[in-house]
Amino acid sequence: MELKDGYSTVIGERGITLSGGQKQRVSIARALICEPSILILDDALSAVDAQTERTILNLIRKEIEKRTSIIIAHRISTVKDCDNIIVIEDGSIIEQGTHSQLIKNKGYYSRLYDLQRLAEDLKAEKEA
């Protein structure tokens, strides 16, 4: 993606128009360039497909590990490699732990993980 003024390019109504996924990628890049001590990504990969999400996460993993990172996501694939996952339902913490601990618990997180994997499998099958 080529931006006229690099990461300073105005995006949106008066600037260039980008897709949701492109906006998210530019936002992540802008956040990382600032080298914050705390990085908060709030559903930052919701507008990209699963393959693009994996690519982005692999590319920014070292940057995330260098600082305190809070990642808010609906997709388990976005948070499964985090050190600590907090599951919130209706504003309350209902589970907490690593991905493997939460899968072993067979609770809400585990059920959601199974549903999301099934949805990805069905989508891949449909596209094949």
Image (cartoon, rainbow, N blue to C red):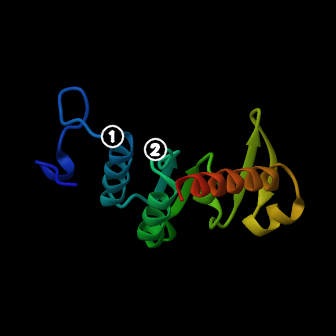
According to the picture, the residue beneath numbered tag 1 turns out to be: 19
**How many numbered circles does the render carry?**
2
Identify the residue under disc 2.
47
Q: Nearer the viewer, residue 61 or 37?
A: 61
In contact (CB < 8 Å): disc 2 and disc 1? yes
Amino acid type assigned to the residue bearing label 1 in the image: Ser
User: SS class of the residue under badge 2?
Assistant: loop
Residue 102 vs residue 115, the one in the foreground:
115
Q: Which residue is at the front of the view, 99 or 127?
A: 127
94 relative to 16 in the view: left or right: right
Would residue 108 appear left or right of 51 to someone viewing this image? Answer: right
Residue 64 horizontal side relative to residue 97, left or right: left
Q: Quadrant of residue 80?
A: bottom right
- Residue sitting at 81 percent across and 51 percent down? 111
Residue 83 is situated, as x and y percent measured from the top left of the image, at 66, 67
Rendered-image quadrant of the C terminus: bottom right
Earlier residue among tags 2 and 1: 1
Q: Is residue 23 above or below residue 51?
A: above
Which amino acid type is marked by label 2?
Ala
Query: Label 2, label 1: how many angstroms apart (C-alpha)?
Result: 8 Å
**Residue at (61%, 57%) from the top-left corner?**
125
- Find the residue positioned furthest to the top: 13
Question: Residue 18, percent across and down?
Answer: 27, 40
